Amino acid sequence: MTTVEEQFTIKIRDKEYSVSIKKIDSRKYIVKIGNKTYEVEVSRKGIEIPNIQSKRLTSLDSRSIPTSVAAAKVVGEGHLIRTSIPGRIMKVLVRPGDRVERQTVVALLESMKMQLEIRAGRRGVVKKVLVKPGDVVNVNDVIAVVEPES
C-alpha cells in the first residue's frame, strides 16, 4: 500500500501549527504536530468525519472537532488519564517525572460552575502532561500519561 503524507496548517486560538498525517492502515495514522509525533488509532462512532479539501485551515475551534477524532487513542504511551466531562482546566498538580498513586489528584477541572478533581487512576510515574491551566477539554480528552509501575 502506498502511503501519502498530508500536510496541513491549522490555527487554534490565534496560534498556527504545522500538522502532517500519514495513514498506516484503515484505523491507524502517524500524526505529527509541530515537532511531536503520535501514533493514533481512530474509531468512528456513528459520525462522519468531514473530508478536508483545503491544505490550509483558517481556524479550528475545539468544539467543532468530532469527539471520536479529538479523543483519538495515543497508542503505546502508557495509562491515559482522560476527562469524564467537558470543562476548563483550572490547575495542573503534577509534572513529568512525578510519582502518583491511584487516588492522586492530577488536575482540577471546572465544569458547570463546579470544581472537580481528576485522579490518576493508576500508580506510576507521570510521563506527559498534555494540558495547562485555561485549556478547554471535551469528554474523553487525554490530559496526562502515566507509565504504570509493575
Image (spheres, grey):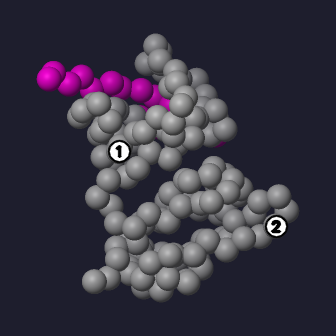
* Residue 117, percent from left and from top: 67, 74
Q: CA distance from mark 1 to mark 2?
A: 32 Å
* Residue 119, percent from left and from top: 57, 75
Reading the image, the residue beneath label 2 is 114
Magenta extent: 1-18
Amino acid type at mark 2: Met
Q: Could you say which disc has been placed on residue 40 in the image?
A: 1
* Residue 66, percent from left and from top: 57, 35
Amino acid type at mark 1: Val
Instruction: For the N terminus, give its image quadrant.
Output: top left
* C-beta proximity under 8 Å, tags 1 and 2: no
* Residue 94, percent from left and from top: 52, 77
Secondary structure predominantly adopted by residues drawn in magenta: strand
Question: Is residue 132 visible to the viewer in this orientation of the structure?
Answer: yes
The residue that appears at 38% across and 81% down in the rendered structure is: 124
Q: Is residue 8 found inside the magenta-colored segment of the image?
A: yes
Q: Secondary structure at mark 1?
A: strand
Q: Which quadrant of the figure has residue 32?
A: top left
Horizontal arrangement in the rendering, residue 17 relative to residue 29 (left or right): right
| Residue farthest along the top direction in this orientation | 53
The residue that appears at 44% across and 45% down in the rendered structure is: 72
